[in-house]
Image (cartoon, rainbow, N blue to C red):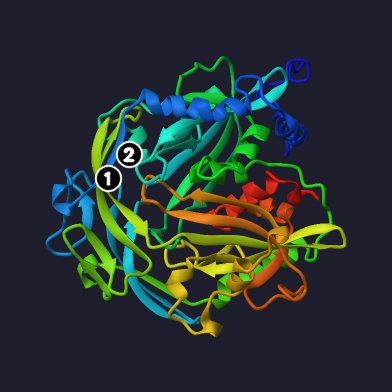
Amino acid sequence: MTSNLRRNPPMGPSPAQLHPREDAALADRLARSAAARGAHLATEDFADWLASRGRAHRFQVDRIPFAELAGWSFDEATGNLAHHSGRFFSVEGLRVTVGDGPVRHWQQPIIKQPEVGILGILVKEFDGVLHLLMQAKMEPGNPNLLQLSPTVQATRSNYTKVHKGADVKYIEYFTDPARGRVLADVLQSEHGSWFFHKSNRNMVVEAVGEVPEHEDFCWLTLGQVNELLHRDNVVNMDSRTVLSCFPVADPQLRALSSDTEVLSWFTAERSRHEVSAERVPLTSVQGWRRGEWSIDHEDGRYFRTVAVRVQAGSREVAGWTQPLFEPVGRGVTAFLTRTVDGVRHVLVHARVEGGFLDTVELGPTVQATEGNHAHLPTEDRPPFLDAVLAAEPERIHYQAVHSEEGGRFLNAESRYLIVEADERTAAQQPPEGFRWVTPGQLTSLVRHGHYVNVQARTLLACLNATAVAVR
């Protein structure tokens, strides 16, 4: 009897199809977008467009006493301030102990928001050039209310409609894989000084097929958004963190330290710091006082917790009340930068913040509010703060005032700077906890979550928006 096995092999799964590990063309496409002026809205017309979106809707934010918060209340046992649904976020207490530094113990209010939100920018080619779909979005804490946000900026409570409001526009492109091609997707931290273990999913998705248009959204090239990053309080924090995740090309293959050396140093920094961060009842937090209108530090420093009533015609819900954190004073956030043998480097700081998920993240050279340190002796002031504050105009390569997350923080602004340093200002062998890295090395680290903090990610986006990054 003749076997049929050779002539008719058994049916089985088809061979797996292999794909390139990297999209070799993406960096060039992003470079073309960074060099392009845009096919839909001229940059010189942007301010008028944004103002028109502000006139199209009613926006108003009023401070209110805590007693007028609707749906929020202080727990009788813990004093924690939370929403009656158990969703959105709560204001609790935090007790922190660190192993070194001028201040080794402190207590404070902290925002606990366990759910992961989506910060997503949708991109699409027009006339062979990638454009970014950006939104004119009102946030109650923004100093000017309306700023340029990602296509989607939503907590899970929002896009699952706990508020029983309207759908989040374009959310389907970030939750349905069939709607687009993912170009970047990474969990990133938010402000470790004000959030406890907070993460958001930072995404860039290239749309498949036609994208419906909405009057509160506009298509801009990467170059246009980069230009807008030079304007005060225009590009919001959520846009800036997603922009830092764009896989832009790195023309430099050399650095003071290899990538492995940088990772080893960072791992050692995480290992050597002893940090204890414990959530405690808000009523037990020492050094803070709760009044009818705010929760304040007894010395008037750091920040306060306040309440607001919001009216916003363009949001999923037209009106609501909520707590916000309001910092005392404007921050200073800066990279010192040096060119070594023709290669640009920036000085990063391995920062400990009480709300970080993993002890330490890489932050800017300076990240401080000057008034918060005025009571400390000179030797305990943040390193390099005075050098940045005293920088001559010709050494400042970039500066703009940017606000922080307007959905949780009220009038929270920082002056972001990139400042040229020399051997006297910042030596090539920096002090413990600091390291010189290239912008390209930072970009590679941003591909992984909880390596680079949100302030350093803003500065990375600003670096990529200037000639400093490639000079």
In the rendered image, residue 435, in percent from the top left (x then y), is placed at 69, 69
Whether residue 221 is situated above or below residue 203 in the rendered picture: above
Q: Count of labels shown?
A: 2
In the rendered image, residue 310, in percent from the top left (x then y), is placed at 27, 39
Q: Residue at x 74, y 37 (%)?
A: 27
- SS state under label 2: helix
Nearer-N-terminus badge (1/2): 1
Mark 2, residue position = 157
Within 10 Å of disc 2 (Cα), the crowding (few <14, some 14-19, many 20+) is some
Whether residue 301 is situated above or below residue 143 in the rendered picture: below
Q: Residue at x 56, y 14 (%)?
A: 210
Q: Which mark is residue 87?
A: 1
Q: Is residue 373 visible?
A: yes
Badges 1 and 2: C-beta atoms under 8 Å apart? yes
Name the foreground residue: 43 vs 469: 43
Which image quadrant: the N terminus? top right
